[in-house]
Amino acid sequence: MTPRGWAVLSLVALTVALVVTAALLIPWHRPPAPRADQLAALGDLPAEQVARSREFRSALRPAGWAAIAIGLLVALLLGLTPLGSRLVELAGRPFGGHWAAQAVLGGLAVVLVADLVTLPFAAWRQAVLTRYGLSTNGWSGWTVDLLKSYAVSAVIGAVALLGFYTVIRLSPRWWWAFGAAGAATLVVLLSFVLPVLVEPVFNRFTPMEQGPLRAQLMQMAARDGVPVRDVLVADASRRTRAVNAYVSGLGPTRRVVVYDTLLREATPAEVTAVVAHELGHAKDRDVAVGTLTGALGAAAAVVALYLLGSSGPLLRLAGVDSVAQPRAFPLLVALVTVAGLVSAPAQALMSRRVEARADAHALALTGDPAAFEAMQRRLAGINLADPDPPRWEYLYSATHPSTVERMAAARAHARETGR
Ligand SMILES: [Zn+2]
């Protein structure tokens, strides 16, 4: 069998593995909370708060969709015309067109152009966030964060690009197989390494002060069978008013991280509800499942890119002879961008199902649906979430159940358990 034949076979096997993993490990059969409860919850929210969050979401929407549209347009322009390959050549020229310079500098140049064209929309978004009082870091803090995230992406990108094109040179016929394995490994590595290495670039963490709340959280984690080593507080208030918490690390390094904003804004019972939700993610190994599906998806994507990239018409549009050249990188970016936009609703759906399971875990663990509902109301108020967003937007991009769905789930739980 030819390398191409093996690639087709591998793609089929990876797709089957991905579908089976998602089918078995994502909690699909979780009926949404009754719509009547949702509407009742919506009616109980202050009308003024609902109106203000809808106004805020409407103000954000044009920047969000424009960024997606312009990002797609530029990716297609660079990938499906010879413009992108010329940009890669240009970036490699000071180094005599050496393949490594084209691969790393050319690749980063393509990504940078895509980032720069959407930069005005990111600034627009930041202006809206500031106007509504959600962002607290000011333009200088925003710029510093932006530069930091560019630096982190540039380092990771340079390593990935150099690795990818080195493999192609070493194994011109089988690079897609090594590339698929490498992409899957990178996903696994990033999901474990990023929290440890990258979080401290953006936030400072201090242990939560000794007291009843800390003791209660540690004790709840132990009772849940998800012991944690520590409860840390992140200084998120430096840049945002938004509240959040998460569990990171595995086994003996597992820790609960709580935003300082959450401690400031919420009651201890509500903080407990949020941490119980996060413990649900840890207990159901949601990060591990996400990493596994991500790794399978990345491997399948590399093989699919190899197969699609050997299509004559696409190569002709991009003005390159082979997908294996660094000059064909813009074509790969265009294909990945389209795939990302097409698969977004499926990813959002899986995320919502997993989040609903963590909510159910929190309700069962705390046995306190009233605090859970109060927390959802507070979250929506602080984050200015539309409690019942437009259906199409919800289906395309919502990673969490809506506020009214989460409140309704708490009410249904209260009814079932008689609390
Ligand atoms: Zn969650």
Image (tube, rainbow, N blue to C red):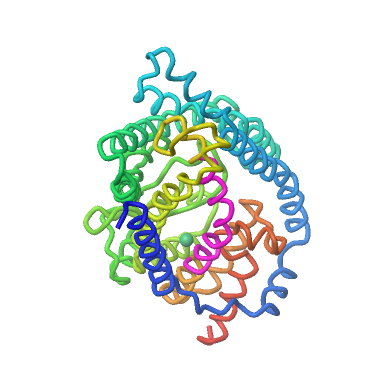
Image location of residue 30, percent across then percent down:
52, 78
* For residue 250, side relative to residue 299 (left or right): left
405 left or right of 323 in image: right
Task: Compare residues 164 and 174 and report the one nearer the observer.
Answer: 174
Say whether residue 179 is magenta: no
Q: In this view, does 69 lie above or below 230?
A: above
Residue 215 in the image: above or below residue 336? below
Give left or right: position of 337 versus 386: left
Residue 375 in sight:
no
Residue 133 placement (x, y as % from top left): 66, 40
Residue 47 in sight: yes
How many marks the image carries: the answer is: 0
Residue at position x 50%, y 46% from top?
Answer: 311
Please identify the residue farthest to the left as the structure is shown: 252
Q: In this view, does 297 lie above or below 349?
A: above
| Quarter where residue 142 is shown | top right
Chain part drawn in magenta: 333-354
Where residue 350 appears, as percent x and y from the top left, is 50, 65
Magenta: predominant secondary structure element?
A: helix
Residue 353 on the magenta segment: yes
Question: Which residue: 62% across, 70% down?
Answer: 405
> Looking at the image, which is closer to me, 228 or 31?
31
Percent x, y for residue 416?
A: 53, 87
